[in-house]
Image (cartoon, rainbow, N blue to C red):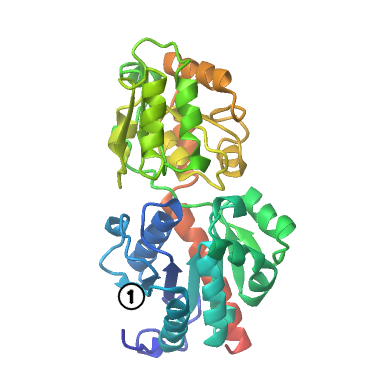
Amino acid sequence: MMPSDRSDHAPQNRSMTETSLKILFHTWSLGGGGAERVFAVLASGLAARGHDVIISTESEDDHNEQYVSRAVRRCPPTGGSLRTLKQLTGLIARERPDISISAISACNLRHAIAATMAGRRHRAIMSYHGHSVAEAELSNKIGYWATPITTRLVARTVAVSDGLRRHIVETWHGSPSKTVRIYNPALVGHQESAALSEADLLARPPIVVSVGSLLPRKNFSGLIRAFAQVTTPGARLVIVGEGPMRGELEAEARRLGLAERVSLPGYMTQPWEAYAGARAFAFASREESFGLVIVEAMAQGLPVVVTPSDGPEEILENGRFGTLVAHDDATAMATAIDRALLEPGDPAPRLQRAAAFDVTTGLDAYEALFREVAAEAERRGR
């Protein structure tokens, strides 16, 4: 990738609010996680707005590749940690982006070091998409342990919910003044398949859909155990996602006599068909800093039954737009699912709430932050 001079396409006498920005996104991969999808969507949306956008990844996983537009420049995966640090430092020094932004705590640590070594830390932004318990790998733990330093080195740190911001600032002693909350932009389009009335939902078969990686913290085993108590005739559970717990979850369904009522169709890059075929959405995750799939389900008009944590509580406004059920209360979860299937309610409030997290709103928030940080750096002469 050759160096580029911003003066070639952005006259120096134009204000920062008028110029396009060169923006570098760096993350682990474009794999199947929510953070990776968010970065792909943000990068493509900002490129469509006329910005010069680059994505750098450390791994070749590309499940979310379809969300990356051709207008976004891609860098080859960098591989191991030390190699990543060297190449990322060189990339930032060579490209001199107006803004560089990273996601996931291990990548955040490497990005903070690389931007500092390249003399661009005042233009660097980190983003956190999960609590420390959700990022159990040693490298991610180290990234969290470094939070008191890295959040003060870089220009800003983004948390995807107010609860996650508190976690970063209060638990990990991140910089209060430099840590901000921006909700994840969710793909809430595809309105042609959304249920617009309770009658639309009742006309569907009594299918409950859930979406997420098949990992212990998503607690799909608890959801399956709760579903064993669901009494709605013909009710079925569809869990969309892939991960290391597939075999265990399939075995649990067989043990409970649910093999014919529980299906795991695998990962879907666009799960709209699954939402469109369902009457309700359920989610028993033990921790969600945001919860993109909850917004996606609401955007399809589905009633949602979820366990409480920062993101879901904020999305649902503590139960105003959906049902919150205590963790590990299988009976309460089953009762709430039965109620959602039998009385799914008016989708309109859910559709309206989901629209508050649409891509345009997210792009506006990130673009405003990027311009603010770039302007600050310009005033510093950096």
Q: Secondary structure beneath disc 1?
A: loop
Is 232 drawn above or below residue 258 in the view shown?
A: above
Is 330 drawn above or below residue 272 in the view shown?
A: above
Q: Is residue 150 visible?
A: yes
- Which of the 4 image quarters holds residue 47? bottom left
Q: Residue at x 35, y 18 (%)?
A: 206
> Which quadrant holds the C terminus?
bottom right
Residue 296 is situated, as x and y percent measured from the top left of the image, at: 41, 40
- Which of the 4 image quarters holds residue 19? bottom left
Q: Which residue is drawn at 45% across and 15% down?
A: 230
- Per the image, the residue denoted by label 1 is 75
Residue 363 is situated, as x and y percent measured from the top left of the image, at: 45, 59
Give left or right: position of 372 versus 212.
right
Q: Which residue is drawn at 59% across and 24% down?
A: 329
Is 233 drawn above or below residue 117 in the view shown?
A: above
Q: Count up the numbered dots.
A: 1
Task: Identify which residue, 324 or 138, lies in the foreground.
Answer: 138
Is 222 drawn above or below residue 331 in the view shown?
A: below
**Amino acid type, callout 1:** Cys
Task: Identify which residue, 320 or 61, lies in the foreground.
Answer: 61
Which class describes the residues within 10 Å of circle 1: few (<14), some (14-19), or many (20+)? Answer: some
Task: Identify which residue, 293 or 344, lies in the foreground.
Answer: 293
Residue 355 is situated, as x and y percent measured from the top left of the image, at: 45, 42
Give left or right: position of 279 versus 82.
left
